[in-house]
Every structure is written in C-alpha cells, then in structure tokens.
Amino acid sequence: MTIKKIAFPYWQSILTFSALLATLSVYVLMLLNLDRGLDVTDEGLYLVSVNHSEIDFLTTSHFHHYTGIVWAMVNQNISLFRAFGVVSLALSAIFLVTSTIKYIQCFTTVKVSRLERALWLSAACSSALVYYYAWLPSPSYNWLILVCCLCSIGITLQLVCATKRKGAYKYELFFLFLLGLVLTIAFITKPTTAVILGANVFLWIYFSTLRKDCWRILLHLALFVSVIMLSHAYFFENGLFSFITNMHKATEYANKLSGSIKLITVLANAAKDIIHIPIFLFENLSHSIYVILVLGLINIFHNFFTTRFDRYLGCLNLALLLWATMIAWWDLNTLHHWQGGRYEGTKVALGGVSILSVICLSALVSAPRKAISFKLSSTSKHFIALIASFALCSLAYGFGSSNGLMRQSSGAYVLWGLAAVLASYSLESNKK
C-alpha cells in the first residue's frame, strides 16, 4: 500500500501531528520521571548486580556483566543509567522498523511512503515504552532480553536482504557476526528465550532466499556464537568450565526453590490466558478499549468507503493504535497504578493482541468471498511471515517466566503493536 498523492493535504498534517503528539506525550512522561522512585526488590537486585558486576553470582542470568559496563560508563548515575535504557530500547525499535521496511521493499511490491514511515517509527517508539509499565526503569535482564528480541529480528531481516546487494558475502558475514553476538547475549541473559530466538532465525534462513546456502550460513553462525561464548567465559566467568558449573548449580537451586515447570504446563497456562483476553479487557475497562472497537468497526466496513478512503486506512489504523497506547499510558499515570501487581501493563499489552486480532479477523469478514482463498500471493506470504515472527518473539520474551507467559509478554508490546501495523497494511489486498 502506498499514498502516491494526498488529495487533501490536511490529512497528512493531521496524521503526522497525531503520531508525533502521541509519541512525544509518552516520552515526556517517561523522561520527567526518570529520577523518581526506587524499587528495593527487583530494581534493588539489578543495581546491586551491576554495582558488583565482577562477582560471579549463582544465577542462570548473567546480564550484570553487560549492564555493569553501562553502569560504569555513566559513572554510577542512576538517572543516566535509566536514560541509556530508554534510548537503547527506542533505537532497537527504530532499527527493527527500518529493517522491516527494507525487507518489504526488497521482496514485495508494496512501497512505504514517508508519511507511513513516520507513523511506523512513531508506533514503534511509543509502544516500546510499555515495557516500563511496572516502573522498573533501570536496565535489567528483562530490558536486555527485549533489546535482543528486537535486534535479532532486525538483523535477520537485514541478513535476508543482503542477498540482493553487491558483495553479498561481505555483508552476510557482518550480519552473522552481529546475530551471533545478540543470540549469545540472549542465551547468557535468559536461555529459554534464546532457544526460541534461535529457532526463529533458523526458520528465516531455511525458508528464505538464504536456503540454498543454509548449512554454510548456519555453520558460520555457530562458529561466531562459539567464539563469542568462549570470549564471555574467559573475560567474565573465569573460564568455560566455571561458567558451565555455575549455570548447572543455579538451575538446580532454581528448581528446588520454585519447582520444575513442565513445557505442557506453560503452554496450557498461556492458552488459558489467551482465551480470557476479551473478558480481562472488559472487566478492567480502559478508555483504550473504545479505540479498539472503533478501529474494528472501521476495518470491518471499509469496503463501503471509497477507494480514496481505503488508501488512508493503514495510516488511520496506525493513528488509532498510537492514541490507544497513549491513552493507556495516561490511565496508568492518572490512576497511579504503576506497580506490576495491578496488572495495568498486562491490560495495555493485551490491548495490542486484541488490535491484531480485530484487524486480522475484520480483514477476512470484510473481504469479498471470491477473494478469500487458501492460495496466498507472494506479498501476503511475506507479510504473514513477518507477523508470525513478531508474535513468536513476543512470546519468546515471556517464555520461562514465573509471572506467566502472556503477562510477561506484556513487556514486548512493541512486537504485538508492529504485528498489528503489518496486518492493517495487508487489508487493501483483500479487497482486490
């Protein structure tokens, strides 16, 4: 979908202003409060860990070695430490959006206009900050693993696009090194998430244009991961044997304290959470639910509008998504529900899941019956692959958490939101 000419110039101004205002409002709210509040439990653990990053803690997450470097760089200034986390998360979201747009323009006929690009970036930057709903603003293992999720998808898409460039082998090695670095840090930070991120990377390599060189690429990636892992063990863990021993002991202690959790139990609880999403949203009524309903009605009945209006549909979806995010944030601020126990962040993130569901279902409902076919176009396949990858990585972020899969995945709302954005831009092809 592209907007070649804007028949009414004020549309461009209104949509761009709406996106910038929504994003600016959320960032102002964040930045004005970075010097406030200190949680003595979770955040206290993060700060103690980074303040003694040279110590080998008996834990399965060794994130403190990397956040400790940042802590030293900012001279132990907690405001700058938090600001670094906010900026890094925003830059990771921007990198993911630019990589996604590049992939779409490389492998589909869809052209993304400047207006759409601005809206996509605004949506990513504002929704990324939903990670901070429980107000634990200091960089932690959750922050680091979310950055790894965003960067792993972005680098993978850049790797796939590199096959279309001259000197592809040179770019391929560069992106494989970056991907190896991200996957290694993800494993060191949260092994359960790293396994799913690795599976996502494998699927992209195997089912994309890289398939002809699949095993060579995977061999190079495995080599980079091995070298980086050995380097980490040498510089931070007193050797590989010590690192493996500590990880094994930490896993045993964690199982004794919380009990071993079976995969089938995790998946069953996740399915239960997904089934109860509509009930949860309506019981915990937020103003943003009205925005979701309006968006659904517009998408369902978009066939009744003119073709000219349909060109604005994707942008309108984005604007509504941005305002839903902003309103939900102001709900948090007004009601003072800034603690995880209030489940406000879960409500915000599940709103993103609902938006994605509404757009996908309304696309099927509103499409002419002759247009609904199990035979998908090449463009549709690429969009579906992107949406599925974003959804998978958002679930990977929460996988293995004692908080529950869907609740923990609330922090990765940026991926649910971007999946909804991509779904909204696939609506126009359903009308043809």
Image: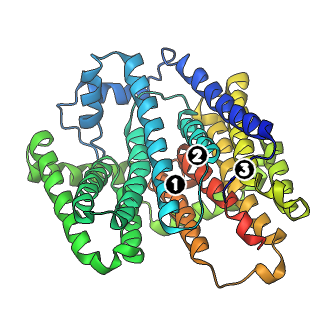
Q: Is any part of residue 156 visible from this angle?
A: yes
Q: Amino acid at mark 1?
A: Ile
In the picture provided, is 306 more to the left or to the right than 72? right
- The first of marks 3 and 2 along the sequence is 3
**Foreground label between 3 and 2:** 3
- Which sits in the foreground, 271 or 33? 33
Say which residue label 2 marks.
117
Number of residues whose C-alpha sits closer than 10 Å to that of mark 3, classed few (under 14), some (14–19) or many (20 or more): few
Say which residue label 3 marks.
5
The quarter of the picture where the C terminus appears is bottom right
Asked if disc 2 and disc 1 are in contact, CB closer than 8 Å, the reply is: yes
Total labels: the figure holds 3
Q: Amino acid at mark 2?
A: Arg
The local secondary structure at tag 3 comes to loop
Which of the labelled discs sits on residue 323, or is there none?
Answer: none
C-alpha separation, residue under disc 1 versus residue under disc 3: 20 Å
**Foreground label between 1 and 3:** 3
Q: Residue at x 48, y 36 (%)?
A: 90
The local secondary structure at tag 1 comes to helix
